[in-house]
């Protein structure tokens, strides 16, 4: 057996140990990317993958760090501005009819995206009626998201994205900043509940009109994607909307016949069943 095959066994034993000991199930994540991330975790600690197995079994402090490393908590404000513009112009008007609007963002990472949505909701006069739940498995990212504090070095890009997303005022109306950091306003933060939820192992989180889950399913294999799409289907009200990432597989969404495409380029779908 060559070194690569042995390494593959070590990775699979490590993921099994993580699952059996702590309940985090990465066994059905896309193979190439989970392999890369396990190897990075080992490299950061100057250890082999085999060395990580006893650590994950016996060192309780290690699991949070391992999860932080295995998940990919990268985000930005108004990423793919056209998607936010489409949500603003096409989906939010349809949500106007609800007295209370529940929104779930699954895989919120450090929160940039959910604050972007909160800004759009405010500009469309819907924020007061909205209750937003933002969830992730990465507790370190969740804490950052809750703080709503981001480095100002990304601001020029965020400003551009905001304008291209149909921004109605100035992004600076939504934060205070010093030379290093910006902090989103409390009026946005208080509408968002950040919580731990694992898409692989946890059930329906709440019943919502809109689910945003962008750039998360790309890390899952086909079977896991299907399972999570079923969870989303169950979590949506009749005719509820699902917005996935633009790099995600359209086929995985469409082959199950659970959702109809509203805008395929923006990966916005509607739960099937009856007329609007
Ligand atoms: C690339 S980030 C996407 C962030 C944001 N949605 C965006 O597109 O800007 C992927 C996030 O999915 C989260 N994630 C991965 N597996 C998950 C799972 N099983 N349940 C919930 N979140 C998960 C990761 O922790 C990470 O924060």
Image: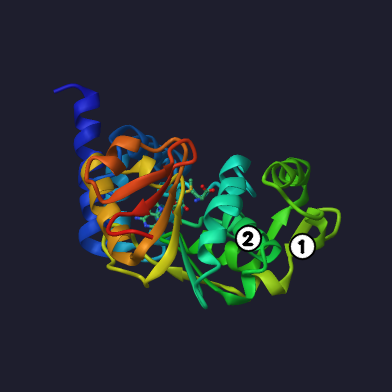
| Residue 275 location (% of width, % of height) | 33, 59
Q: Residue furthest left?
A: 1
Q: Which quadrant holds residue 114?
A: bottom right
Camera-side residue of 134 and 48 = 134
Q: Mark 1 — residue?
A: 174
At label 2, counting other C-alpha atoms closer than 10 Å, the crowd grade (few under 14, some 14-19, many 20 or more) is many
In this view of the protein, which residue sits in the foreground, 47 or 119? Answer: 119
Q: Is residue 16 above or below residue 249?
A: below
Cβ–Cβ below 8 Å for labels 1 and 2? yes
Q: Is residue 186 above or below residue 68?
A: below
Alpha-carbon distance for marks 1 and 2? 9 Å
Is residue 272 positioned above or below 183 on the image? above
**Residue designated by label 2:** 115
Q: Please count the marks in the image.
A: 2
Q: Quadrant of the image for the C terminus?
A: bottom left
Q: Residue at x 68, y 66 (%)?
A: 122
Pick the quarter of the image with the N terminus: top left
Q: Is residue 106 left or right of residue 10?
A: right
The 10 Å Cα crowd at callout 1, few under 14, some 14 to 19, many 20 or more, is some
* Element marked by disc 2: helix
Dot 1 falls on a residue whose secondary structure is helix
The structure residue drawn at horizontal position 63% and vertical position 60%, both measured from the top left corner, is 115
* Horizontal side of residue 26 vs 99, given as left or right: left
**Extreme right residue here?**
179
Query: Between residues 80 and 167, which one lies in front from this camera angle?
Result: 167
């Amino acid at each position: 057996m060559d070194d690569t095959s042995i390494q593959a066994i070590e990775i699979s034993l490590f993921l099994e140990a993580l699952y059996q000991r702590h309940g985090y199930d990465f066994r059905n994540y896309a193979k190439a990317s989970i392999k890369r991330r396990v190897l990075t975790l080992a490299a950061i600690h100057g250890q082999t993958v085999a060395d990580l197995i006893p650590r994950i079994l016996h060192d309780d402090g290690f699991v949070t760090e391992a999860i932080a490393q295995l998940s990919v908590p990268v985000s930005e404000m108004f990423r793919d501005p056209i998607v936010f513009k489409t949500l603003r112009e096409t989906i939010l008007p349809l949500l106007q009819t609800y007295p209370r609007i529940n929104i779930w963002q699954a895989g919120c990472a450090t929160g940039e995206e959910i604050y972007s949505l909160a800004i759009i909701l405010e500009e469309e006069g819907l924020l007061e009626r909205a209750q937003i739940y933002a969830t992730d498995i990465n507790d370190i990212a969740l804490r950052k998201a809750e703080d709503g504090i981001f480095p100002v070095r990304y601001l020029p890009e965020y400003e551009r994205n905001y304008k291209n997303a149909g921004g109605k005022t100035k992004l600076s109306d939504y934060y205070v900043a010093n030379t290093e950091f910006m902090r989103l306003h409390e009026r946005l933060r208080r509408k968002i509940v950040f919580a731990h939820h694992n898409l692989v192992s946890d059930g329906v989180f709440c019943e919502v009109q809109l689910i945003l889950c962008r750039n998360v399913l790309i890390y899952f294999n086909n079977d896991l994607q299907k399972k999570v799409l079923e969870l989303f289907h169950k979590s949506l009200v009749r005719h509820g909307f699902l917005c996935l990432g633009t790099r995600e597989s359209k086929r995985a969404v469409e082959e199950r016949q659970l959702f109809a495409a509203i805008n395929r380029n923006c990966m916005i779908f509607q739960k099937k069943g009856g007329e609007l």
